[in-house]
Amino acid sequence: MQSILKSSHGFDLVPIESKLLSNRKIFIEGMINSETACEFLRQIMFLVSEDAEKPINVLVNSQGGEINAGFLIYDIIQSCKTPIRLFCVGQAYSMAAIIVACGQHGRYILPHSELLLHEPLIESQINGSNSSIQAVAKSLMKTKSKLNAILSKHTGHSEDKIEAMTIGNHFFNAEESVAFGLVDKIIDFSEIMEG
């Protein structure tokens, strides 16, 4: 999509993503993977170099994806000195829910949006020897512990409670997301536009 922008030479067509980026709005949408994470990194680096003080708004509408790619996004949000605000706009499932929950400068959700938590999943069929399958299982348990610790840190719940909440799929509507500590506040669209 393109936006029409008035310039000294008349009118120019500008990609909407560029216009939104200039307004410090970044989107995490679709599947989270290494490409998504690297694009997020590039956008954050650009905005921080433009103005290290002005907040960045990240709008999330994703069904989740690769855990390692999600960890890269998480690490950027946690270590960036520029304030980053997270908004769930639609759905934030799996790794996307953890990204929304990790915001340190505001975590928001639209009234009819939802989050989903579950334990880590194996993304493909496992083949190999008994020892290689055990190694995969051990790695998955370490990842699960790491995710539980992250959610515990950002929600204030014990890791045992997080463990219980992530057995199977657990959906949270907007009110439940606030009550569980995954987000701070339910907002409406106008607050995103003002923000």
Image: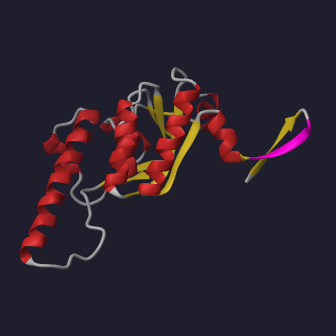
Q: Position of residue 191 (x, y in %)?
A: 59, 31
Residue drawn where x is 36% and y is 41% of the image: 74
Tell whether position 13 is magenta.
Answer: yes
Chief secondary structure of the magenta portion: strand
- In the rendered image, the residue lying farthest to the left is 131
Residue drawn where x is 38% and y is 28% of the image: 104
> Horizontally, is 188 left or right of 184 in the view?
right
Q: Which residues are magenta?
A: 9-14
> Horizontally, is 9 left or right of 18 in the view?
right
Closer to the camera, 168 or 147?
Answer: 147
Residue drawn where x is 70% and y is 46% of the image: 16
**Compared with residue 39, is residue 9 higher up or lower down, i.e. above or below?**
above
- In the rendered image, the residue lying farthest to the right is 10
Tell whether position 6 is magenta.
Answer: no
> Horizontally, is 161 left or right of 103 in the view?
left
**Compared with residue 13, is residue 123 higher up or lower down, i.e. above or below?**
below
Q: Which corner quadrant of the image does residue 47 belong to?
A: top right
| Colouring scheme, one of rainbow, by chain, secondary structure, one colour | secondary structure
Q: Position of residue 133 (x, y in %)?
A: 13, 72
Residue 50 at least partly seen: yes
> Horizontally, is 131 left or right of 49 in the view?
left
Residue 116 at least partly seen: no
Closer to the camera, 14 or 150?
Answer: 14
Closer to the camera, 93 or 2?
Answer: 2
Residue drawn where x is 52% and y is 26% of the image: 55
Q: Which corner quadrant of the image does residue 154 belong to?
A: top left
Q: Position of residue 158 (x, y in %)?
A: 16, 37
Quadrant the C terminus occupies: top right
- In the rendered image, the residue lying farthest to the top is 53
**Compared with residue 192, is residue 35 higher up or lower down, i.e. above or below?**
below
